[in-house]
Amino acid sequence: MGMLRAVCILGPTGSGKTEAALGLARSMPVTVINYDSRQLYADFPIVTAQPEAHEQAQCPHRLYGFLPTAEAMSAARFAELARKEMVEAQEAGRVPVLVGGTGLYVKALEQGLADIPPIAPDVRQWVLERMGREGPNVLHEDLAQADPETAARLHKNDTQRIARALEVFLGTGKPLSVWFHEQKRGHTGVDLCKVGVSTTLGELEPRLRKRIGVMLERGAVDEVRRAWEQTPEREAPGYSGIGCAELLAHILGEVDFEETCDLWYRNTRAYAKRQLTWFAKEPGVRWIRAEGFDRLPGLVRAWGADCE
RNA sequence: GCCGAGGUAGCUCAGUUGGUAGAGCAGGGGACUGAAAAUCCCCGUGUGGGGAGUUCAAUUCUCUCCCUCGGCA
């Protein structure tokens, strides 16, 4: 199987990645492939800032708005879907351009994941139930018996990672740390031209604030209300996105509107900060500022020429 | 005007039977291998509303002034 090559645009939420991708699409045939874990969801095009219809009309867009609110994605499944889309785009003679903000998904795609088989749902559920009942500290002690190496690496309050490590051990009989050691690296066949949109929190703040206002004007509240009518399960994975969670609490009468908007903004900002932290360490990124988007086609062509 | 409750970190508040104070949120930094817009870690000196008094020592007790919020007029 040949090399899978794609452009990957990185940057925090609201930094202008969509704009960069569409700019690129004007100078070469491009297929945009989403790598944002929230923009996968069908019920939340507005709150998750999916590209609008007129934007999606400019070139093929993939992996946007197809996942039901009740369904969870995983990094592994995402990587599989994205590879498929990359292959299709390449076969159609188009440049795949990954656009999104979920750092883990890019990592899974580029570096691969450990070859852990799917965990039986009842094992997973059992672990989660215990987590709910006994809390992370107790399970962390269990993990210290089963997989001391992973336990030492994880903080005793880190519910999600402790649950994952435990379900892997119980479901496969092999500690997560062993799976990691056995992992073959660098054989994904994915070669990314990573371009980062360089910005700061200070520059982002007014844009993020404004974007919330625009989302409300476009009907963000109704969007979440409709989703709730169809999927009235508080724990449904689709509701964990920023904006969805806050608006849902408001719709259910738990938080007044002003407080909701305030929380929404703060959580968005905090998220952008986390993304900044993640992407700053990402290896091999070419950083450009929004004013320099016109350099993007040149960058991509130069990178493409490397492999001819 | 009277009665009551308050004025402590950017915000909401806790506490100190008198020994100069700490949580949550916000903010800053960081981590990140199948939930990742998730999950988690580290970082807390602030004229304790102003002034005076009692005391070895006051944010804590007393007096007074100012301000806020209820209730009564």
Image (cartoon, grey):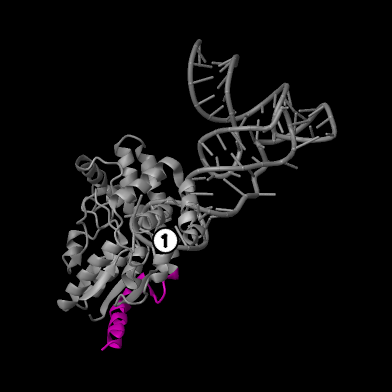
Return the residue at label 1.
Answer: A175
Q: Residue at x 30, y 36 (%)?
A: A252
Q: Which residues are magenta?
A: A281-308
Q: Looking at this view, is A233 or A279 the one in front?
A: A233
Residue A166 horizontal/vertical position (percent):
40, 54
Mark 1: which amino acid?
Pro
- In magenta segment, residue A198: no
Q: Residue at x 32, y 54 (%)?
A: A211
Q: Residue at x 28, y 87 (%)?
A: A307
Name the secondary structure under disc 1: loop
Residue furthest front in the image: A173
Residue A17 horizontal/vertical position (percent):
31, 66
Q: Is residue A200 visible?
A: no
Q: Looking at this view, is A21 or A126 the one in front?
A: A126
Quadrant placement of the C terminus of chain A: bottom left
Q: Considering the whole magenta stretch, tell me its main secondary structure.
A: helix
